[in-house]
Image (tube, helix red, strand yellow):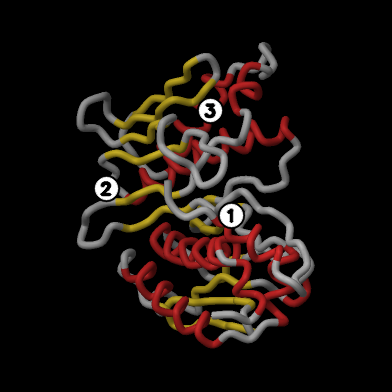
Amino acid sequence: MGYNARDKMTQYEKESGHEKLTDYDFRISSIEGMGAGSGFRLNNLTLPENYEDLVENIDKKINLRKSFSEMFDADCRHFQLPQGFIEFKDNLLSQVVFGGLGESSRLFLDENRFDYETGEGTYQFENVENIGMALVLAKTAAEYINFLKIDQGQNEKCSYVNYFNNGSRDIFFSENLKIPKELADKAKETKNKYFESKFASEANNIAGRFGATVASLGFENMFLRWFSIQEGNACDYGIDHDSILDYTYSPHNVDSPRQAMALHGIGAAYINKLLNARNALSGKS
């Protein structure tokens, strides 16, 4: 069933001299470019634990189909995308489809796909080759999951690429692209050049799949404070010193979905690396 970080960390925590670390059972979602015009894949967009109970307890007065369809339609109009529709099954978001069924682009719920820890269902793309569609599909599902998580009181909300128009142009950014405080604090104190070098290769691969090139990675020990791509005018994501207690990445001059997805993918991969291998924060490579 794949890599099990929980078992690895349990063994690590039993070693002498190591304090018990918080058990993080979530991963940061992202859109992955498949390269060479092969479309996009969705990673780690997973329903919360006990989602069946959450869905069953949704206030009957809330018309989810109407609310989410209105948000979805507005996004589609904004990006001039073809007409689509949203399908719910008893208030569970089952799919979002562009242009009808068959070979159309869609996001769908795969309830049998193995999730990292919970074993719950994940959302997947099918035949998604348009980057605007990829953004809107992931945004719709992430907002639905975050709607469920509000009722559950979870702090780890889904992260996704979002946008707003400032009156003259679109600005793109990531919602909830945040490093857990404990891991960020440890990363700032830990030197590991191998980690930095290995991650630089991964970041270049992620950016390249969106036709972008990494310009720089601003590491402070193992803490990735900011990172940029060459495409655009000083286009980067960073954590300002003034907001250091938040550990959330903010955008600078991010003007297109492609730039935002490349940067978001780098940030998500970095945070997931800290979550996957917290023993690297002990100084081990």
Q: Check disc 1 and give the amino acid type.
A: Asp
Which residue is drawn at the image coordinates 33% and 64% (left, top)? 210
- Residue 100: percent from left, percent from top: 27, 24
> Front-most of 151 and 122?
122
Q: Where is 159 relative to 198, above or below?
A: above
Q: Secondary structure at mark 1?
A: helix
Mark number for residue 7?
A: 1
In the rendered image, the quadrant that contains the C terminus is: bottom right
Residue tagged by mark 3? Answer: 68
Distance (Cα) linking label 2 and label 1: 37 Å
> Front-most of 22 and 148?
22
Q: Secondary structure at mark 2?
A: loop
Q: Check disc 3 and give the amino acid type.
A: Phe
- Residue 140: percent from left, percent from top: 49, 37
> Front-most of 156 and 73?
156
**To which quarter of the image does residue 52 belong?**
top right
Distance (Cα) linking label 1 and label 3: 38 Å
Crowd tier of the residue under label 2, counting other residues whose Cα lies within 10 Å: few below 14, some 14–19, many 20 or above: some
Q: Check disc 2 and give the amino acid type.
A: Glu
> Front-most of 168 and 8?
8
